């Protein structure tokens, strides 16, 4: 019975019932059982309604409600009258109550003993809330107020390289299949620019943002889960070039660091699971540009920024928590360099690779599922800088494009296995260019 949590099990036999609690202890017993009937104590008998997306709604006893607050918060009016044992359940459908929560109006009845003058709010991501009416004294009482943290990890299958510099700024893109095959150029959409950044968001989509086009910009372009790039979205936050970006929280993203005409910066901008970029968050850690970033951890819910230049090349890293908080500097490991790239691999790990250390290198550094950066791995493939990288095939990665010796712009790629092993050069497809970026999508 150890697999049954938060529910009760009635064991029935010959008209007699044994009731077991959530930990398996016998609460009442009236004989041996010969069959078992599972009863969900958290709303299994409720009548579940269609998804609620509005800013207000009136709940009815006996119903379960999926509350989607992606676009707005929701005020819920409870029934004006209730009987002992009436129950209602609300679930954070899009796991967005942490951004837009719900507020319960108890409509003249008490809520946990407080009258309806009290404000009842729930603002934590992933909550399942089950309330039962206990009578006039205490009124509605939550019997379940549970944050569902064990979210299945969605691993993206395809990738996209985009933007960059040829003889000027470009906006063309190249899709990457779930087998790591790069496709020919797709005509660019949005403002041509170079030194942008990109990240996954929403579990299956991507976003390109920031960059330089003769002046710094904060413009963004969303990428659908079919790899289609949308037109420009007006920029939010400090316009800058050379930032980095990665996903966090399983379905959100973060842009960070970069440079303006005034110098390097460490500001960050969070990206919601709907692709909305937030205003600047004050810098944490050493300000720098031309760094790289990727996600890591068992739940793919944390990230790491690493390397870059402050005016001098560094190997400093900064971890990103599953709520998008950037930590202070971690002493660098590996060769200090800039103009490198990073991506996830192996479902829960990451890899930094290539870049400029004073010369063009193909050196890589693996990132464990605890965010620990390893010492240098001898480079494989053509040493180059101003490259891009993305996850593909759910657990593999690819480095591509950049500037090799000469300097010569290339479209060469190098695949990364699900064990973090970088392969030899694959002949380039698409327009050779540098200062581009890449991200994954489903």
Image (cartoon, grey):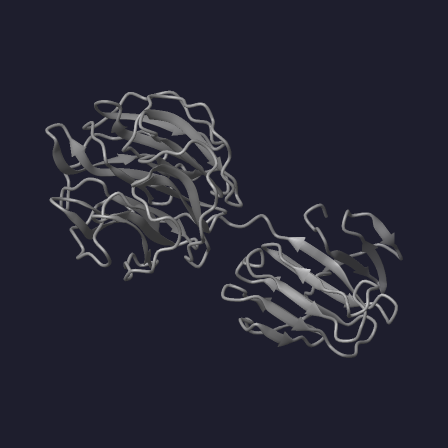
Q: Quadrant of residue 398?
A: top left
> Residue at point 26% right, 29% down?
355
Residue 313 in picture, x, y percent from top left: 32, 25
Residue 168: percent from left, percent from top: 14, 46
* Residue 11 shows up from this direction: yes
Residue for point 29% across, 56% down: 227
> Based on the displayed image, in which of its 4 quarters is residue 97 positioned?
bottom right
Tell me if I can see residue 159 in this picture. Answer: no
Whether residue 207 sits left or right of residue 408 in the image: it is: right
Number of numbered callouts drawn: 0
Q: Is residue 105 left or right of residue 355?
A: right
Q: Is residue 101 above or below residue 350?
A: below
Above or below — where is 295 with respect to 71?
A: above
Name the foreground residue: 369 vs 58: 58
Indicate the position of residue 164 as horizontal and vertical percent values: 21, 45
Q: Quadrant of residue 259?
A: top left
Query: Which residue corresponds to the image point at 62% horizontal and 54% vertical from the top-left?
Result: 124
Position of 231 relative to 294 (above/below): below
Q: Residue furthest front?
A: 262
Q: Position of residue 18 (x, y in %)?
A: 84, 56
């Amino acid at each position: 019975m150890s697999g049954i949590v938060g529910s009760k099990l009635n064991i029935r036999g010959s008209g007699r019932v044994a009731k077991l609690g959530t930990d398996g202890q016998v609460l009442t017993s009236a004989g041996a059982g010969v069959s078992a009937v599972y009863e969900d104590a958290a709303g299994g008998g409720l009548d579940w309604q269609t998804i609620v997306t509005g800013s207000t709604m009136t709940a009815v006893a006996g119903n379960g409600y999926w509350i989607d607050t992606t676009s707005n918060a929701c005020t819920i009016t409870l029934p004006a009258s209730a009987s002992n044992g009436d129950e209602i359940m609300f679930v954070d459908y899009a796991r967005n109550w942490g951004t837009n929560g719900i507020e319960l109006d108890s409509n003249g009845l008490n809520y946990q003993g407080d009258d309806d003058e009290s404000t009842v709010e729930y603002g934590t991501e992933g909550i399942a809330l089950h309330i039962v009416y206990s009578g006039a004294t205490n009124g509605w009482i939550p019997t379940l107020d549970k944050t569902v943290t064990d979210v299945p990890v969605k691993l993206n299958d395809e990738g996209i390289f985009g933007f960059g510099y040829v003889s000027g700024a470009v906006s063309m893109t190249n899709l990457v299949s779930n087998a790591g095959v790069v496709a020919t150029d797709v005509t660019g959409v949005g403002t041509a620019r170079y030194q942008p950044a990109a990240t996954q968001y929403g579990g299956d989509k991507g976003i390109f943002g920031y960059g330089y086009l003769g002046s710094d910009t904060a413009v963004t372009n969303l990428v659908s889960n079919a790899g289609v790039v949308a037109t420009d979205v007006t920029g939010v936050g400090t316009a800058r070039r050379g930032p980095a970006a990665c996903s966090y929280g399983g379905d959100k993203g973060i842009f960070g660091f970069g440079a303006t005409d005034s110098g390097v910066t460490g500001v960050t901008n969070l990206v919601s699971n709907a692709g909305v970029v937030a205003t600047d968050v004050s810098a944490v850690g050493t300000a720098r540009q031309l760094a790289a970033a990727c996600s890591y951890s068992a739940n793919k819910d944390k990230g790491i920024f690493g390397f870059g230049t402050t005016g001098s090349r560094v190997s400093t890293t900064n971890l990103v928590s599953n709520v998008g908080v950037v930590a202070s500097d971690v002493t660098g490991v590996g060769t200090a360099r800039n103009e490198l790239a990073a991506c996830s691999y192996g479902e829960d790990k990451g890899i930094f690779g290539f870049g400029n250390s004073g010369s063009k290198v193909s050196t890589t550094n693996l990132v464990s599922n605890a965010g620990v950066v390893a010492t240098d791995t001898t480079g494989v493939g053509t040493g180059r800088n101003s490259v891009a990288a993305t996850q593909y095939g759910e657990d593999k990665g690819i480095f591509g494009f950049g500037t090799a010796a000469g300097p010569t712009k290339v479209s060469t790629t190098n695949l990364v296995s699900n064990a973090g092993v970088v392969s030899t050069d694959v002949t380039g497809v698409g327009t050779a260019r540098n200062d581009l970026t890449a991200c994954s999508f489903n």
